[in-house]
Amino acid sequence: MNVVKSAVLALGVLALAACQNGGPFGNRGGAAGGANGANAANGGPIEESSLAYFNERIGDTIQFQVDQSTVTAQGQVVLDAQIAWLRQYPDRVILIEGHADEQGTREYNLALGARRAAAVRNYMVSQGILESRISVVSYGKERPLAVCSNEECWSRNRRAVTVVSGGMNS
Amino acid sequence: MLISRFQTIIALLLALVAAPLAAQERPVIEIDISGGVIEPMNIALASFVPETGDAGDLATNIASVITSDLTGTGLFREVPTSAHIGRVDSINATIEFADWRAINAQILVIGSVAAGASGELTVKFRLFDVVTQRPIGDGVQLAGSQAQWRRMAHKLADTIYTRLTGQGGYFDSRVVFVAESGPKDARLKRLAVMDYDGANLQFLTDSSAIVLAPRFAPNSRDVLYTSYENGAPQVFLLNVDSGQRQVLLADALNMTFAPRYAPDGLSVVMSMEQNGNTDLYTVDLASRQATRLTSDGSIETGPSYSPDGSLIAFESDRSGGQQLYIMPANGGAATRISNGEGRYATPVWSPRGDLIAFTKIMNGRFHIGVMNTDGTGERLLTESFLDEAPTWSPNGRVLMFFRETSGANGAPQIYSVDLSGRTLRMVPTAGNFASDPAWSGLLR
């Protein structure tokens, strides 16, 4: 019963951190999910504790099959790397966004996005990440990453995004 | 004389005008709901007579809205004023039927409009069958205020429609929906309300939070919807008149969505998600107590009450894909009613109780369709890249839904279609993209 509460909390932390640092933070936060890349140089060295490292080197996103919420083998590789990073930086908290493609009805897709976000959370918890560090939100089909109307875009939109916040070096 | 229940806004006064012969017993036109081809009836509205000096524009505008309402049904075709031979100078004039027969009018409407100095408005009309040269029902007089002229026109059109078809009307009604703007990957969404024909559009929220799928209360003044205002989707209540809004369950920490009022307006059925699993709950509006109705590990959403409140239709993927089910309103065993190919979603019970409208996804295409409440008699009314979310007209004869075009510039608009599937029209929304329409009942 603490899903929304922690989501709100996480967003609060995010806003606070942004204020304190006076700079961009959590560029994929909340409703703006999937915004342009972090301030990392192309291919250049990135501080391992940074969001840019998490988002781009590890990958903040995993994809799902049509109408499925099972984490694929490929997705699990990404999640394992995310989990390793989260173990290394235990002050970070995450918001997992579940998304669906446009080939479904709005309310069902909200439920499907919630299933996908929960699948990621449950996997992370099973690997020892504290539940208190994780909140979830479903965006259904409201926030596509790719806007074309074919499988190339739809596959990118059937996703769960791990949005990191908290910590000091952001 | 009959004073209506329409509060003090409009008093519907029947038979003030000279009451001629008795109303005819059979409808003049049968509404076809099975898809057969019917020829629209020719209807002529003689220019409405201004009874006061400054009522000319109102007379023209009121006649124009009535014409638009009636021709918009697809059942009537306007005989344009430019073709008229006959002139009507008074609401009590003797009709020269030959003049109207000569231009192939089958139905004639005559009317008059009086505008009072303090904003009052009085509209009268009489309806005639040109072929039999007889009045259809008694004359009607409506009294209201000039600010309400569109509603008065819709009420007159509803009366004409009812006399000609034997069916309840639907023109004096509103639609609450989601107005959209901005690019597809960062869409801004606002709740808005408008007359059923797109007039008088008003925004109800700003675009700071995503809002989804509003539904009218039976009183047509309160609205339930889902908003990301608090970070994650939660059900909100909003009063259209005051703009005041509040979260439905202040302590709910889970995602809540897909709310619909019970027919008595006293409770809500909606979806609540818990650890990735979505089930249906009812919430009593007075106590805000939630009661769980389903407990499957599958997704249960898209609920819709039967008009008598005894049953709930909903969608579930318990069988593997989205299908439609019906269960008692307090939960219990559910019966699957959809059996065709593809996936079925968003069941919506007709206000007449006879049909369930739905969204169907098949071979990558979306349809709006209807079926009997036992799942038989399925008929698809539309097809496109994305047609979704049907909502019924107050008389259960027309559906609105939204149609979204494909591609990077794809965007939604609201459409209406009648049960024959032939009269498909885009509903104007003042230039906004528009989705998730919900039709009110007839206004009071």
Image: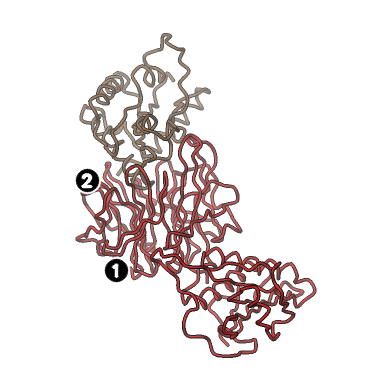
Chain colours: A brown, B red
Q: Position of residue B45 (x, y in %)?
A: 65, 72
Q: Position of residue B117 (x, y in %)?
A: 77, 74
Q: Is residue B22 left or right of residue B340?
A: right
Residue B310 tag number: 1
Residue at 49%, 27% in the rendered image: A18
Is circle 1 on the same chain as circle 2?
Answer: yes
Circle 1 crowding by C-alpha within 10 Å: few under 14, some 14–19, many from 20: few
Circle 2 crowding by C-alpha within 10 Å: few under 14, some 14–19, many from 20: few
Q: Nearer the viewer, residue A140 or B283?
A: A140
In the rendered view of the protein, which quadrant contains the C terminus of chain A? top left
Q: Amino acid at mark 2?
A: Gly
Mark sitting earlier along the chain (1/2): 1
What is the count of numbered marks?
2
Residue found at the very far right of the displayed protein: B53
- On screen, residue B33 above or below B140: above
Residue at 69%, 86% in the rendered image: B94
In the rendered view of the protein, which quadrant contains the N terminus of chain A? top left
Q: Amino acid at mark 1?
A: Ser
- On screen, residue B392 above or below B433: below
Q: Secondary structure at mark 1?
A: loop
Residue at 43%, 31% in the rendered image: A146
Q: Secondary structure at mark 2?
A: loop
- On screen, residue A60 above or below A107: above
Q: Is residue B175 left or right of residue A167?
A: right
Q: Is residue B288 visible?
A: no
Subunit ID for the residue under disc 1:
B
Q: Quadrant of residue B291?
A: bottom left
Residue A81 tag number: none
Q: Is residue B305 left or right of residue B201?
A: left
Which residue is the site of mark 2?
B320
Q: Nearer the viewer, mark 1 or mark 2?
A: 2
